[in-house]
């Protein structure tokens, strides 16, 4: 069974930075597409960005383009989300998720990490 554990969340002032990490265990990390989702209070969970097993990056939220960067280190079975110039609107629980090759949905999820940006 694949386990995903996020870390790096916290409280930061607007304009600050955080780097989230998601460590995977129990599966073949290098073959998974990895995504970062977020869910703000009273809003639906949304896919922010993802990185394929080949390293192709897609950003789905226009508001984070140029500020958030996803990356992966297959040797460490870890995916990262570097978040710069944070805004109060980025406040949410951030989840990482893994999708197996050929899967139509994300198969494995982390427990989430809270990011709070104060104004």
Image: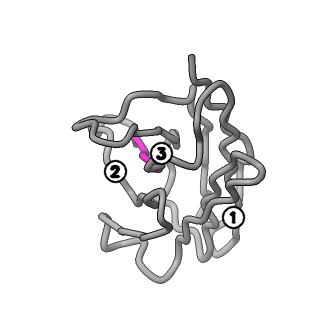
Q: Which residue is mark 1?
A: 13
* Nearest-to-viewer mark from 1 and 3: 3
- Give the quarter of the figure containing the C terminus: bottom right
Q: Residue 105's image quarter?
A: top left
- Give the distance between the C-alpha atoms of the residues marked 1 and 3, in whole angstroms: 33 Å
| In-front residue for pair 97/15 | 97
Q: Which residues are magenta?
A: 35-39
On whether residue 34 falls in the magenta region, the answer is no
- Give the distance between the C-alpha atoms of the residues marked 3 and 2, in whole angstroms: 16 Å
Dot 3: element: loop
x and y, in percent, of residue 79 in the image: 63, 53
Residue at 53% across, 71% down: 68
| In-front residue for pair 61/99 | 99
Of callouts 1 and 3, the N-terminal one: 1
Whether the residues at callouts 1 and 3 have beta carbons within 8 Å, the answer is no
Q: Which residue is mark 2?
A: 47
x and y, in percent, of residue 118 in the image: 62, 58
């Amino acid at each position: 069974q694949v386990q995903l554990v996020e870390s790096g969340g916290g409280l930061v002032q607007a304009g600050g930075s955080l780097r989230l990490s998601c460590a995977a265990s129990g599966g073949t990390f290098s073959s998974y597409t990895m995504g970062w989702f977020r869910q703000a209070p009273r809003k639906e969970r949304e896919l922010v960005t993802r990185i394929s097993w080949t390293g192709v990056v897609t950003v789905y939220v226009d508001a984070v383009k140029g500020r958030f960067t996803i990356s992966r280190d297959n040797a460490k079975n870890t995916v990262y989300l570097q978040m710069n110039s944070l805004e109060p609107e980025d406040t949410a629980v951030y989840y990482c998720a893994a999708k197996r090759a050929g899967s139509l949905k994300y198969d494995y999820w982390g427990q989430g990490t809270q990011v709070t940006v104060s104004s």
